[in-house]
């Protein structure tokens, strides 16, 4: 039996579902039941009838699934797969920031710990952040964290009064404006697609700014272009190439090492041994679930 067959057999025996983020290794995407961006993974976790959810992604994604699905067992193939952005915002520091701005609403990116979500009014992902912020009452002033690039982008698009946390994704903030300028000259007919976690000097050069799924859908929906310049984690190129084999995708290879920590061997072992389990204390989960459910209702 191949390792892929072992994994699928374990899923069948244990009524388990494998959810994988688009930034996972290609072989993990191939063996997964569902591939998606952060929003889709949360939505799929909430809807699943499976007894076990295996989250092939980083820790906050598994934690979000555990908060939404307290009756299911949530596994992650590597519990040390973290996120530098989520780590940049500790709950104690957010609490202090809130106390300094008592009249503000807290809007947190999903890339945060359960403890941060518990201090949040509404969670957003890169798919729904603009829509949700536009829906908040006009008079609401907003504390947004932890991604300052996404926050600045939302602030510029919506004109809302916002204070931004000083965090960023070390992967997306690595994209170079100079390299992008050179690529645009080399490929003048290729639209630039960028994730909103990229810095302003990248977003200012982009034709399309959107979540991982939005960028994929743009490539799928625009057969008039033969080339695209992609500014996001290159894991998404696998699905783009599968969906649109005839287009040329030009990308800087800035990989997220946390996302790559998940391997087929770790996935097989985690399903077989049903560990590591991601648990959130019920008292904390009760608070953290509210802003996540609000996001899902507003999406
Ligand atoms: P999305 O899945 O919302 O595009 O976010 C990208 C990301 O960096 C996930 O950690
Ligand atoms: Fe975190 Fe950035 Fe990796 Fe996403 S790509 S998991 S935001 S470090």
Image (cartoon, grey):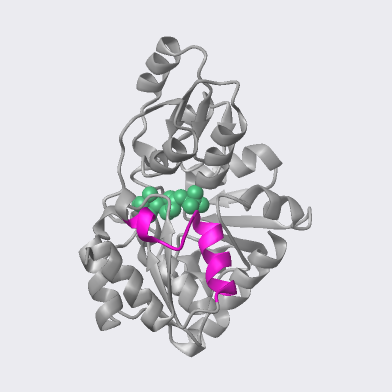
- In this rendering, would 295 be left or right of 17? right
Q: Give the residue drawn at x 36%, y 67%.
A: 59
Main SS of the magenta segment?
A: helix
Where is 35 relative to 46, above or below? above
Q: Quadrant of residue 237?
A: top left
In the rendered image, residue 127, in percent from the top left (x then y), is placed at 59, 50
Q: Return the x and y of residue 132 as percentages of the image width and height.
A: 69, 55
Left or right: where 15 falls relative to 144: left
Up/down of 293 relative to 251, above or below: below
Name the residue at the right extreme. 138
Q: Where in the figure is residue 131, as x and y percent of width and height?
A: 70, 50
* 286 displayed left or right of 62: right
In the displayed structure image, the side of residue 249 where residue 118 appears, left or right: right
Judge whether residue 32 is colored magenta: yes
Q: Along the line of sight, which residue is nearer the eye, 165 or 52?
A: 52
Residue displayed at 55% across by 79% down: 49
- In the rendering, at what x and y percent does residue 55 appear? 40, 68
At x 54%, y 66%, the residue is 42
Q: Looking at the rendering, in which quadrant would you find the C terminus?
A: bottom right
């Amino acid at each position: 039996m191949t390792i892929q067959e072992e994994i699928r057999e374990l899923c069948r025996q244990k009524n388990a579902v494998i959810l994988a983020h688009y930034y996972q290794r290609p072989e993990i995407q191939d063996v997964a039941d569902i591939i998606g961006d952060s929003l889709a993974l949360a939505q799929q976790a909430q809807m699943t009838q499976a007894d076990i959810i295996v989250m092939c992604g980083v820790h906050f994604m598994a934690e979000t699934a555990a908060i939404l699905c307290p009756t299911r067992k949530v596994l992650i193939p590597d519990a040390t797969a973290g996120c530098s952005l989520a780590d940049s915002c500790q709950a104690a520091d957010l609490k202090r920031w809130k106390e300094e701005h008592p009249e503000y609403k807290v809007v947190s990116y999903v890339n945060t710990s359960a403890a941060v979500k518990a201090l949040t009014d509404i969670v957003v992902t890169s798919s729904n952040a603009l829509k949700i912020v536009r829906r908040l009452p006009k008079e609401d002033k907003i504390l947004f964290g932890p991604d300052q690039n996404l926050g600045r982008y939302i602030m510029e698009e919506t004109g809302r009064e916002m204070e931004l946390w000083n965090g960023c994704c070390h992967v997306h903030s690595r994209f170079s404006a100079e390299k992008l300028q050179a690529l645009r000259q080399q490929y003048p007919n290729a639209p630039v697609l960028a994730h909103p976690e990229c810095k302003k000097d990248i977003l200012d050069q982009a034709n399309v700014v959107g979540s991982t799924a939005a960028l994929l859908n743009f490539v799928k929906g625009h057969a008039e272009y033969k080339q695209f310049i992609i500014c996001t984690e290159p894991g998404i190129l696998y699905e783009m190439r599968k969906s649109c084999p005839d287009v040329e995708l030009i990308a800087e290879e800035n990989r997220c090492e946390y996302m790559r920590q998940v391997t087929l061997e770790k996935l097989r072992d985690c399903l077989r041994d049903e560990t590591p389990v991601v648990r959130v204390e019920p008292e904390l989960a009760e608070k953290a679930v509210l802003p996540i459910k609000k996001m899902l209702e507003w999406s």
